[in-house]
Image (spheres, rainbow, N blue to C red):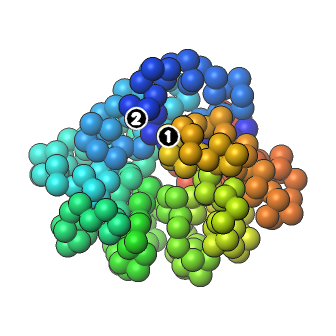
Amino acid sequence: MIFDSHAHYDDKAFEEDRDELLAQMIPNGITGIVNVGASLQGVRASQELAEKYPFIYAAVGVHPDEVGSLDEQKLLWMYDLCRKEKTVAVGEIGLDYYWDKEAHEFQKLWFVRQLQMANDTGLPVNIHSREAAQDTFDIMKKEHAGTTGGVIHCFSSSAQMAMEYVKLGYFIGVGGVVTFKNARVMKEVVETVPLEHIVVETDCPYLAPAPNRGKRNSSLYLPLVTAEIARIKGMDVNEVEEILYENTMRLYPGIKSVK
């Protein structure tokens, strides 16, 4: 049993075969998926997917590249969505200094506002951080640590930084990158972080694991990720998958376990 803790099946990359692909999940051991909002349109689409598929849950939040679309009315709309039964997280929210589509201070403003939304609605957070490791950590520690918990999605910083998040009670999101031959730092992160603080994700359609690197990603490739984690940890893959599944249930307490 594998649970995809972060996916984007609303993406246009799935337009032609979304239903056919999602129909393959349960028969192939993918027992659940959290579809994560990134834009306001993605937030709405995630809700629609959660309503259509029993095994899909939604996260509500706006990616730092898209915060220019936010205002007080739209924030109130997201508050309402956070209270829906199948909304299990606020995300993905955070900071992105790589694309720099929005001013850093503006990103920080809406990051903090959405962290407050998570606190107010009792939901864990799904955090995006790219080229902004220290600022993200500082805001998380000040504004959110010790509250509703969450995951640092698609973690890309050092093993040392990962352990600082673990000390604050957060999970580390691991996806296809860990299978890349040149992913030395990510392999060190998995080696260092206790398995009980790791969850697996796809971020699909992006970041497909080797040997499918560069292709469209999907949750069906997650066994390649769990196998690499098991190899790094020197553990049986079935045991690893069991622990990773239980971790996801702890990360997202709003999900009803299918076990």
Residue toward you, 139 or 230: 230
Residue 135 as seen in the image, left or right of residue 88: left
Residue at left offset 53%, top offset 64%: 155
Q: Residues within 10 Å of mark 1 (few under 14, many from 20)?
A: many
Alpha carbon distance from label 2 to label 1: 7 Å
Query: What amino acid is labelled 1 in the image?
Result: Pro
SS for tag 2?
loop
> Which label number is shown at residue 115?
none
> Is residue 237 in view?
yes
Query: What amino acid is labelled 2 in the image?
Result: Asp
Residue at left offset 31%, top offset 62%: 99
Q: Dividing the picture into quarters, in which one does residue 137 lie? A: bottom left
Residue 60 as seen in the image, left or right of residue 27: left
Residue at left offset 55%, top offset 18%: 20
Q: Which residue is mark 1?
A: 205
> Is residue 193 in view?
no
User: Is the N terminus in the top left, top right, bottom left or bottom right quadrant?
Assistant: top right
Q: Dividing the picture into quarters, in which one does residue 45 lie? A: top left
Residue at left offset 23%, top offset 71%: 104
SS for tag 1?
loop
Residue 158 lies, with reference to residue 147, above or below; the image says below
User: Is the C terminus in the top left, top right, bottom left or bottom right quadrant?
Assistant: top right
**Image location (x, y in percent) of residue 53:** 50, 23
Residue 53 as seen in the image, left or right of residue 234: left
**Image location (x, y in percent) of residue 14:** 46, 28
**Image location (x, y in percent) of residue 245:** 68, 47
Q: Which residue is mark 2?
A: 11
> Which one is earlier in the sequence, the residue at label 2 or at label 1?
2
Q: Are marks 2 and 1 in contact (CB under 8 Å)?
A: yes
